[in-house]
């Protein structure tokens, strides 16, 4: 294992990670397959090689959830399915998995189409759209309606959207600058984070009591959480709360970020935009996209996949901790070592993807099944994103439905870059709407 040079006293590599996280991550693979970095008091071993990342993700007992990211996430999501240890995971995953079963997808796709119609209803020709905000509004409504309805108060969706954003920002800040004292200071950012925590808790409690009052089985995530498990056990309110927060945190922002980057990339590549319009005109002829259209929307699907490769959302460094003395790629790793991997770093390796920084949706024509560890926007193994199929469907159907009626054009002179310390939404992405 190589120790990354240029560690500063006390701070280690935290300034480089915090100031230029994407460049920092891209540079790591030139130092080796396993690279030791230091962020303030914390040391992590970053796995840069795809085969080793795949091994890491399959061995979820030896490399359990923990380390920088998950220690911070547990402060808000407790021990939900995304943060719980491997020993509790199989049981939890079995309970929530049916919410994403193939049979439920037509219902989810219907909600996606309805929410796209609600989003675009007030749009007017020539209007300037705040793209990340609009996409966030859309994905918040889709997740809330697909997983928790009835029982949610739809008028609270904008406030919920803002609180989830504040929570994700706070967690990312706490992860990139792991100096606990900084996060106890009464700064604006810290106060916003605390307010958001309370707000999400309050909303979840309200949701729970509404649903307990109606008590019916809607077959969605919320019903699964309230029903007895396969062993007959019921979840406590605290456990239900952890799951709800987990799904809100995991589910709302990431798809919005992907859609926002996709619009930016499409707008910046007029040739792809023309081909996208040709595809959606041929398949949809102006109507909203349905689940059954997915196979015909080949280019649209490849745009979504290529966007996830270039800008895998919220996944700067995903972390694990070793539960025993172990090894990876022949490197000994003592118990308690923090291990990390970065989808962004893997997706930008020139030895895996030719011209890795280029937006080239057609590259996916030649890739049937990516080699293990080379395309991991959703992770892999037992802890792989529970909603990967849902997300790919949502991204493809939403891009197609909107592109069938609207063209989103870049504003001349506007420069776009990732905002903040994670692969988040593009910074200040406004685009002009033109009715087609
Ligand atoms: C573009 C969209 C999304 C991306 C890129 C994404 C990415 C990921 C990744 C990388 C993981 C694994 C993390 C790790 O191994 O440490 C994960 C797990 C998870 N995601 Fe997603 N996600 C997305 C959307 C969603 C949505 C829409 C939901 C739910 C509504 C969701 C729910 C979850 C849950 C519950 C887990 C934990 C799974 C487990 O540990 O069993 N995600 N996601």
Image (cartoon, rainbow, N blue to C red):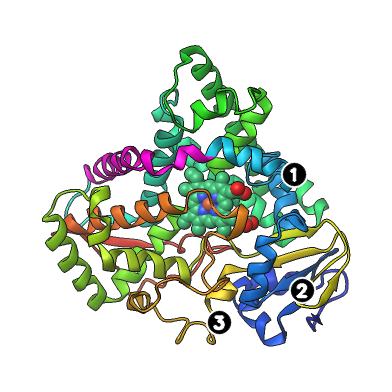
* Residue matched to label 2: 13
One can see residue 164 in this view:
yes
| Residue at 44 percent of width and 71 percent of height | 369
Q: Which image quadrant for residue 88?
A: top right
In magenta segment, residue 108:
yes
How many marks on residues? 3
Question: Badge 2 local density, few (<14 within 10 Å), some, or many (20+)?
Answer: many
Say if mark 2 contacts mark 1, CB within 8 Å.
no
In magenta segment, residue 145:
no
* Residue matched to label 1: 87
Gap between marks 2 and 1 measured at Cα: 33 Å
**Image quadrant in which the C terminus is located:** bottom left
Using residue 239 as the reference point, say whether residue 417 is left or right of it: left
Q: Which residues are magenta?
A: 97-122
**Image quadrant in which the N terminus is located:** bottom right
Say whether disc 1 or disc 3 marks the residue closer to the N-terminus: 1
* Residue matched to label 3: 349
Q: Which image quadrant for residue 151?
A: top left
| Residue at 54 percent of width and 64 percent of height | 423
Which tag is nearer the camera, tag 3 or tag 2? 3
Q: Secondary structure at mark 1?
A: helix
Q: Is residue 302 above or below residue 399?
A: below
Q: Is residue 56 above or below residue 113?
A: below
Foreground of the two, 347 or 230: 230
Which tag is nearer the camera, tag 1 or tag 3? 1
Task: Indicate if the residue with disc 1 has its beta carbon within 8 Å of ligand 1.
Answer: no
Gap between marks 3 and 2 measured at Cα: 21 Å
Q: Position of residue 158 (x, y in %)?
A: 43, 38
Q: Position of residue 156 (x, y in %)?
A: 44, 30
| Residue at 40 percent of width and 36 percent of height | 146
Say whether disc 2 or disc 1 marks the residue closer to the N-terminus: 2
């Amino acid at each position: 294992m190589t120790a990354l040079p240029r560690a500063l006293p006390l701070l280690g590599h935290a300034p480089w990670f915090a100031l230029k996280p994407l460049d920092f991550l891209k540079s790591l693979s030139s130092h080796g397959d396993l690279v030791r970095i230091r962020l303030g008091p914390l040391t992590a071993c970053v796995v840069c090689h795809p085969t080793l990342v795949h091994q890491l993700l399959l061995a979820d007992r030896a490399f359990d959830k923990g380390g920088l990211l998950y220690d911070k996430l547990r402060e808000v999501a407790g021990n939900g399915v995304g943060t719980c240890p491997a020993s509790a995971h199989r049981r939890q995953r079995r309970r929530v998995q049916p919410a994403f079963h193939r049979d439920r997808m037509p219902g989810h796709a219907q909600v996606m189409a309805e929410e796209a119609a609600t989003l675009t209803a007030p749009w007017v020709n020539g209007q300037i759209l705040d793209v990340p905000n609009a996409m966030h509004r859309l994905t918040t409504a889709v997740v809330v309606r697909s997983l928790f309805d009835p029982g949610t108060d739809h008028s609270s969706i904008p406030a919920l959207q803002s609180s989830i954003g504040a929570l994700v920002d706070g967690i990312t800040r706490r992860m990139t600058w792991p100096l606990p004292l900084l996060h106890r200071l009464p700064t604006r950012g810290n106060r916003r984070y605390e307010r958001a925590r309370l707000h999400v808790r309050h909303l979840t409690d309200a949701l729970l009591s509404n649903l307990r009052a109606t008590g019916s089985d809607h077959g969605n995530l919320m019903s699964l959480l309230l029903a007895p498990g396969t062993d007959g056990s019921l979840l406590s309110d605290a456990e239900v709360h952890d799951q709800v927060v987990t799904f809100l945190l995991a589910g709302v922002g990431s798809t919005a970020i992907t859609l926002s980057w996709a619009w930016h990339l499409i707008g910046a590549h007029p040739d792809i935009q023309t081909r996208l319009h040709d595809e959606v005109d041929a398949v949809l002829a102006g109507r909203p996209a349905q689940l059954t259209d997915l196979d015909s929307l080949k280019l649209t699907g490849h745009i979504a996949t290529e966007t996830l490769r270039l800008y895998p959302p919220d996944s700067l460094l995903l972390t694990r901790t070793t539960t025993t003395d172990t090894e990876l790629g022949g490197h000994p790793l003592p118990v308690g070592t923090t291990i990390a991997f970065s989808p962004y770093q893997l997706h930008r390796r020139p030895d895996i993807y030719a011209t890795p920084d280029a937006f080239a949706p057609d590259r996916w024509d030649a890739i049937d099944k990516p080699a293990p560890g080379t395309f991991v926007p959703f992770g892999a193994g037992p802890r792989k994103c529970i909603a990967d199929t849902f997300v790919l469907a949502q991204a493809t159907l939403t891009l197609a439905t909107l592109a069938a009626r609207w063209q989103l054009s870049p504003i001349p002179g506007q420069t776009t870059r990732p905002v903040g310390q994670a692969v988040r939404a593009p910074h200040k992405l406004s685009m002009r709407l033109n009715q087609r």
